[in-house]
Image: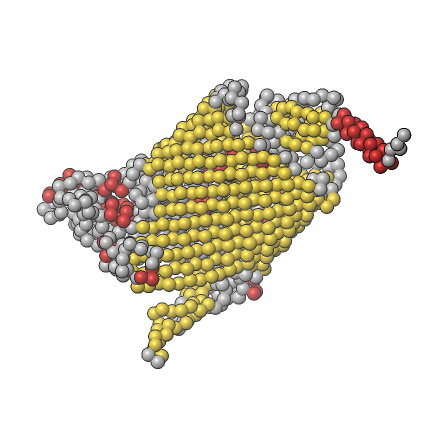
Amino acid sequence: MKRKKPTKILSRLLLFALVICTTSISAQQQILSGTVSDTNGQVVPGVNVVEKGTSNGTSTDFDGNYTITTTTQNATLIFSYIGFQTLEEPINGRSSIDVTISEDAQQLDEIVVIGYGSQKRKDVTGAVASLKAESFVDALPVAPEQLLQGKIAGVNIVQSSGQPGASSTVRIRGTSSISAGNEPLYVIDGVPLQFGSANNSVRTVTSGSSPLSEEAINPLSLINPADIASIDVLKDASATAIYGSRGANGVIVITTKNKGQYGEFLQYDSYTGLAYVPELLPFLSADEYRAYANSNDLPFSDEGTNTNWQKEVFRSAITQNHNISFAGGSRTTNFTASLGYNNQEGTLLSSGLKKYTARINGNHTTLDDRLNIGVNLTYAKLDETRAAVNSNIADEGGNILKDALRWAPTLPVYNEDGSFYQIGALRINPVSWTQVSDESDSSLLLGNMNAAFTILDGLKISTNLGYSNEDVSRFTNIPSTHPAGEGQGGTASISKYTNRNILAETNLTFDKQISKDSYLSLLGGYSFQRFETQNTFTSANNFVSDATEWNLIQSGTIQSNTSYKDANRLSSYYGRLNYKLKDRYLLTFTLRRDGSSRFGDNNKWGTFPSGALAWNVTDEDFMQNSKISNLKLRVGYGITGNQEIPNNLYREQLSIAGSAIYVFGGQAIPSVLPTNFQNQNLKWEETSQLNFGVDYGLFDQRLYGSVDYYIKNTNDLLLQFSTAAPSVVNTQWANVGEVENKGLEINVTGDIIANENFNWTSNVNFSTNKNEVLNLSNENFQRDEIRTASGSGVVGNNALTQIIKPGYALNTFYGREFTGYDADGLETYLDVDGEDGADEVVIGDANPDWTYGFNNTFKYKNIDLSINFRGVVGNDIYNNTAAEFSYVSQTPGVNVIRSALDTGSSRAQTAQYSSQWIEDGSYLRLDNLTVGYNFNTDKVGFIKKAKIYLSGRNLFVITGYTGFDPEVRTRSIGIDYLVYPRPRIFQIGTSITF
């Protein structure tokens, strides 16, 4: 008998052992599935399901379902989710486990994103307001800041016009600065950005002489609102001091969606809409125009037409929007991604935009959950076409809207041969402005990578690397065949602007329950950020051919060819301490030290501290049987800064002075001269703010809200002062002056009706702010007042409409007070002393006395309805448009507002700026009404949710203002001149989740 080889015996024994081990392991493992619901029977997506004592886990999908393979049949599953009690459930041999998790009253407060971290609402000591994606309307706006309109007390947002993608002016607790920026700091997924909503303007030609738009391009339009999970607004110094020299105007923190918040899903959202201008200005019709001319024996051009020029340049515009978002992965590695497309026609001819967005967010957890790595990446592209509307145009200059108002209604649009009817270069056929091209292309790449490693229990180190690159290109062309370009042989311009931002941050955090009654949270960090901007601008005229537009600009005569490149850096150390005693006594202390390259050697570094105390009164024993379910008292004080000024103002700068040319050897050499004196003492503006707040809740949080009162003083204002003559430089910069804002904010939310079939939630927010300039002088520099905000058009005449003076608010209108007409039909004005002509006095204030919002959500079975109102009271508007077109001195020839015929004004009276054109700008606006129907998809396995909705925006405005719209801002807040009117929009949309 043949003997078996030892190797064969050994291999068979190993195979037998492997089979036995595999069978044993399979017998120990357990595959489990189930559904997680809340106490109301609603499924809960995104619940973490973890095998106790291991890193093995998963999370529930959009339907609340989960599947997990445990390492043993005797395992225990842990179900956890923010706002709910953690539940432990032993398997006990089961293969299917459905669980119900209960809301945790102590964790029910929403998570609020603050600087470099987050907190439960209950633990917040500062004035912080939040808006979650669940409260957004279905048909989202183009830009994210518009989501906040009328929703948060103390935040006043004015959209500059109705142009697609228009910028907005955002003010948190009033205007604090005269020369520096007043926009809040925007932080997107942990990356602070240098741009606001209204500070990027790409040049065309010299201001005041171009018909082309000078309205700032809104970089926030490049953010897709559908990607946003939450917007948190930090309002007081306790909340914003962690951002130091950039926190004086408030901070808006935008957080985008990730899988952990919303579970696995595939969602498609789409809407299409129709927009139109709801009301035209009441200019004379052709019959009224003829009747006025004939009754006064005045000659005029009459081609026998009845043209309504406003109707000729406005149109019904189509809007469409598509967005696909999806998420997936495991408990340890997951992602969220989206693709968006928006195409919006403007209601004014030759205007519109197309927006393309893409975003991906990813997270990976490893090393037994000790290391978390995250990536957020956004790319967006915005293509805009702009109508030729310029609110800053001077004198008789025209554009599409100005000519639509002033052109005679007795003239036709076209000649018999189909060409545009024209009467000359000064006043141009309004519709022919569509021959002018004005295009801009914007792109934004925004991303960051972060990593956090848990060193010990409660001790974590993290780093955040961020980058943004914004590119804006603008191309304009006025052909030689158009009257506006005929005299110059056609004009064209190319402008390119780039804004780059590099961020590197490292933070160390310690969070620990240090005793039974004490909880301590510490943050320490370092941040370095570099901003770089560059611009090139070229313009030319007298082109060989119009066919190439701007694409062969060297074929014309170069009129301007300029460029610049600039950079600034910010280096920062910061820390924060949060201490909680017995879950009711809260202390926050923050300190940041910033070093900025924008300021002189003597003040390059600044220190910005803040502190806050809060008391959760409802956790006291004497409150346990009270009807008050939440009562927290807050007080905070801190100092923040404002460094939003141009670079290098502290240095002596040189520039080429084009008007000072010297000839050497027969060659013209432009001179190089200083443009400003150096000032090594130049520093940032400082804002100190004291805030008192109360958070409250009644009837088990059926009624809840907050009340805040603040006093905010900004000193060391950055102002320009005249230099003593003789001097090569006319002005210099210095830190002089102080502005105060103080106000009250009230927010009330109530679940008025809450039952199985019907729910009604209502929110009212109210705020008032009093602004006052305290001084404009110090021991070295004196100034009594500053005149600002020049008028536009034929009423301009270099007239300055507003004044900055101690005792007055910023944006105060100042001028002659209109008292009527004399016997000759000429205007008369207040003259108290009877000397030196009419007196100049305060004639208005562009700041509202108070602002408010009223928001309601109704749900009845499968139907939901949202209604949002907002408004302002007590603000004044200078109606520059009415001031220009309410005088008959140039009629016929120029059309006028119908009321001009009834004023009693003489034809000898020219257009003048006075109190006659200051109007009350108070309004109540039905901002949005949306009604939706949610389909029952239980019988459709692959569809989880389906909804269809109808939405209306700007449905009505109740106001006494006589312009297109009372929500205006042209050269300054409260001035209305040729503003692109805000449209009324109707939309139908759908949302489907798979």
Percent x, y for residue 395? 26, 55
Left or right placement of residue 2 versus residue 846 in this view: right
Q: Residue at x 58, y 38 (%)?
A: 335
* Visible residue check, residue 929: no
Q: Seen from this angle, which residue lies furthest left?
A: 297
Specify the quadrant that holds the N terminus.
top right
Q: Single out the residue that lies furthest toward the front.
A: 1
Whether 894 is drawn above or below 20: the answer is: below
Q: Position of residue 442 (x, y in %)?
A: 43, 49
Q: Position of residue 990 (x, y in %)?
A: 44, 29
Q: Nearer the viewer, residue 31 or 855?
A: 31
x 66%, y 24%: residue: 33
Dividing the picture into quarters, in which one does residue 873 lie?
top left
Q: Is residue 138 visible?
A: yes
Point out residue 741 in the picture as x, y percentages from the top left corner.
48, 47
**Between 544 and 325, the one nearer to me in the picture:** 544
Q: Residue at x 63, y 25 (%)?
A: 36
Name the foreground residue: 485 vs 161: 485
Residue in the image at 55% along x and 47% along y:
447
Q: Is residue 921 above or below residue 685?
A: above
